Amino acid sequence: MSETDAAKGGRGAQLKHTGLRPGWTTGACATAATTAAYTALLAGDFPDPVTITLPKGQTPAFALAAEELAPDGTYAMAGIVKDAGDDPDVTHGALVRSTVRALPPGSGVVFRAGPGVGTVTRAGLPLDVGEPAINPVPREMMREHVAGVARAYGRGRDGADVEITVSVDHGEEIARSTWNGRLGILGGLSILGTTGIVVPYSCSAWIDSIRRGVDVARAAGRTHVAGCTGSTSEKTVVAEYGLPEDALLDMGDFAGAVLKYVRRHPVDRLTVCGGFAKLSKLAAGHLDLHSARSQVDKGFLAELARRGGADEALAAEVAVANTGLAALQLCAAAGVPLGDLVAETARDEALAVLRGAPVAVDVICIDRAGTVVGRSALR
């Protein structure tokens, strides 16, 4: 079964290559809710389930979880519970609502942020400051679907004239678990999605946040940004360089996502900071640092130790060390700068991924307590 087939298959479908069930983006849910609400506004009744067409042609159907039609016919509201499939998405189970009101002819489609949907407050995002955080593809999906409903009920050949207010129950609370605040999206969640489908464990939202973080930093005039594997490494680079919050990229395990995006959208300087073991994976050429997808290579660390002056006995101990940290401690006791060697090699790997982009790179390795155990020169 292809991803497309899985999307058509509804709740029970699975992705063939993973056995996991896909889900729907907030953008798809908002589009379905908007379609149902506008249909009710024009026809007096809600379609349930409501079927929409996604950008790649899939036609999923969504059951309504909430509906309201104003007695005077001035507005209609429909709500869809987001099903993220088997993806560990913080918005799974959230109720996405859309309230549609008719506007005077010629008004076009106007988007509003209701409760639980954020507002853009910083430049660098694909939306203007002051706009509701409803991304471009979901906006286009909603425009297309209300235009289709308008045509179906003889209300306009060129589109619809409506105000669409999207809200998410408890969205402001849920948003505290996202990077929206750092990106300057305040008051709630973003309505996201480019395909309408959530692919389990694709981590597309995380990678998209990394990219938007680079965009926001560049728009703010930041010339030095830091890709950090977690909160401890963020504290380290703030202490080292005094970087502001909007210069910090929550890289997590996605070193490749940071490097590839900065390659296309350069900044003057990139600091990569993270735990010694994770960054030893980058030094060994891995761009995904998650433990399920790459492992600390003790043989590689042993070779680095040799380069740093370790004798064969020490190199042999490093090669069979229980953990990367144990290897580091063995070398530290012998005066071998394994931390610096890892940082320097990781920097060189990062520069290789950047392919000559005008970005200077340095790397800082830390232990779990946040102590710097290795660093490279800026190059």
Image (cartoon, rainbow, N blue to C red):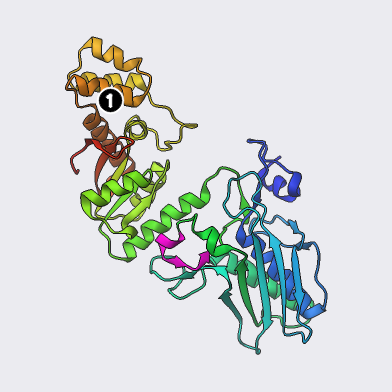
Quarter of the picture containing the C terminus is top left
Left or right of 144? Residue 224 is left
Asked whether 188 falls inside the magenta stretch, the response is yes
Q: Secondary structure at mark 1?
A: helix
Relative to 373, 194 lies left or right: right
**Quick one: 287 or 152, which is closer to the camera?**
287
Q: Residue 180 location, x and y as percent?
A: 46, 61
Q: Which residue is mark 1?
A: 328
Q: Which residue, as the protein is rendered here, is positioned at the far bottom?
A: 104
- Tell me residue 234's x, y (percent): 32, 48
Residue in the image at 76% along x and 84% along y: 73
In-front residue for pair 18/2: 18
As displayed, is residue 95 above or below residue 110?
above
| 299 w.r.t. 203: above or below | above
What amino acid does circle 1 point to?
Leu
In the image, 240 versus 344, the foreground residue is: 240
Q: How many marks?
A: 1
The answer to whether 24 appears left or right of 134 in the picture is: right
Q: For the residue carrying disc 1, how many other residues have a C-alpha within 10 Å: few (<14), some (14-19), or many (20+)? A: many
Give the residue at x 58% y 46%.
Answer: 88
Give the x, y percent position of residue 150.
73, 78
The magenta region covers: 180-189
Q: Most extreme residue toward the front, as rendered? A: 369
- Give coordinates of residue 265: x percent, y percent: 34, 56
Is residue 252 in view? yes
From the viewer's perspective, is residue 341 above or below residue 91?
Answer: above
Give the quarter of the image for residue 103. Answer: bottom right
| Magenta run includes residue 200 | no
Residue at (28%, 55%) from the top-left corner?
A: 267
